[in-house]
Amino acid sequence: MIVYNKLWETMKKQNVTQYKLIHEYKVSPGQITRLKRNQNVSTHTINLLCDILHCPVEDIMEYIPSEEV
């Protein structure tokens, strides 16, 4: 399962809020909800987050085998 726990940590370190993602960077609130629920998001969204946060994909998401979730 792909989880986005690292996204929230990276955002906190860089002082980027969900409000800022939505209002300054025009990230859809629906995409934020999907990320919070560890649901599927497009590679476009992942790329956008990497651009906004100036970080590699590993700072946004990670794979955890299903039996460990």
Image (cartoon, rainbow, N blue to C red):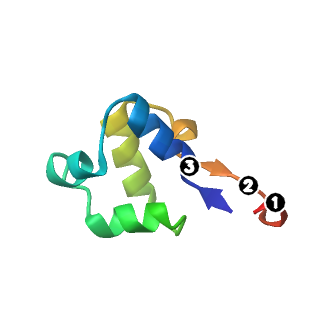
Q: Is residue 33 left or right of residue 37?
A: left
Q: Residue at x 49, y 39 (%)?
A: 9
Count neighbours of disc 1 (C-alpha within 10 A) and say few if under 14, some if 14 to 19, many if 20 or more. few
Q: Check disc 2 and report the residue beneath it.
A: 64
Q: Quadrant of residue 29?
A: bottom left
Give the Cα separation between the discs numbered 3 and 1. Answer: 15 Å
Percent x, y for residue 23? Answer: 15, 52
Q: Is residue 58 left or right of residue 23?
A: right
Percent x, y for residue 37? Answer: 51, 67
Residue 5's mark?
3
Q: Residue at x 22, y 55 (%)?
A: 22
Of the two numbered discs 2 and 3 in the rendering, the one whose residue sits closer to the viewer: 3
Q: How many marks?
A: 3
- Amino acid marked by disc 2: Ile
Q: Examine the rendered structure and indicate whether residue 16 appears above or below residue 27.
A: above
Q: Nearer the viewer, residue 47 or 9?
A: 9
Mark 2: secondary structure: loop
Q: Examine the rendered structure and indicate whether residue 6 appears above or below residue 3.
A: above
Placement of the N terminus among the 4 image quadrants: bottom right
Q: Is residue 36 left or right of residue 3?
A: left
Q: Check disc 1 and report the residue beneath it.
A: 68
Mark 3 vs mark 1: which is more N-terminal? 3
Percent x, y for residue 69? Answer: 75, 63
